Image (tube, grey):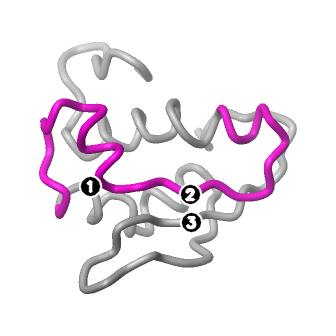
Amino acid sequence: MAGNGIKKGGRVPPNEYLANFIYDSYIVPAQARGERQVTVPVLQVWKALDCMYTPDFIRGVLGSMKFRNTYHLSLTSTEEASLPAAYTFKLHRYDSASPAA
């Protein structure tokens, strides 16, 4: 499912597609580099997806408990003026880098 956003039997919901994209593009590479935390800039995600989702929608996914629980992330901080511009997560070490089943 990760990568193309297609699940057996149809399309994944936009929030799951976005979560998969962020996980594959930011979390997995940071884990592979052995980093202990990763910062995900909202506008960078927005631009990488050619403005497919609004920055507010991206903030909603990044700030959700579902995203953090699925990928075993702890939100450590947000960079903000009025709305969060970036979210920083603590990466937890597991035997597998894949999300919980």
User: Where is residue 94 drawn, in percent x and y?
Assistant: 83, 45
Comparing 87 with 68, the one in front is 87
- Marks 1 and 2 sit apart, C-alpha to C-alpha, by 14 Å
- Marks 2 and 3 sit apart, C-alpha to C-alpha, by 4 Å
What quarter of the picture does the N terminus occupy? top left
Residue corresponding to mark 2: 39
Residue corresponding to mark 1: 58
Residue corresponding to mark 3: 88
Residue at 42% x, 61% y is 66
Residue at 62% x, 43% y is 100
User: Where is residue 37 drawn, in percent x and y?
Assistant: 71, 58
**Label 2 sits on what residue type?**
Thr
Task: Report the mark closest to the observer, 1 or 2.
Answer: 2
The segment highlighted magenta reads: 29-56
Residue at 63% x, 54% y is 38
**Label 1 sits on what residue type?**
Ile
- Marks 3 and 1 sit apart, C-alpha to C-alpha, by 14 Å
Residues packed near mark 1 inside 10 Å, few (<14), some (14 to 19) or many (20 plus)? many
Instruction: State yes or no: discs 2 and 3 in contact (Cβ < 8 Å).
Output: yes
Work out whether mark 1 precedes mark 2 in sequence or the reverse, and give the earlier one.
2
Work out whether mark 2 precedes mark 3 in sequence or the reverse, and give the earlier one.
2
**Label 3 sits on what residue type?**
Thr
Lateral position of residue 80 relative to residue 35, left or right: left
Residue 43 on the magenta segment: yes
Residues packed near mark 3 inside 10 Å, few (<14), some (14 to 19) or many (20 plus)? some
Lateral position of residue 93 relative to residue 65, left or right: right
User: Where is residue 63 drawn, in percent x and y?
Assistant: 38, 69
Instruction: State yes or no: discs 1 and 2 in contact (Cβ < 8 Å).
Output: no
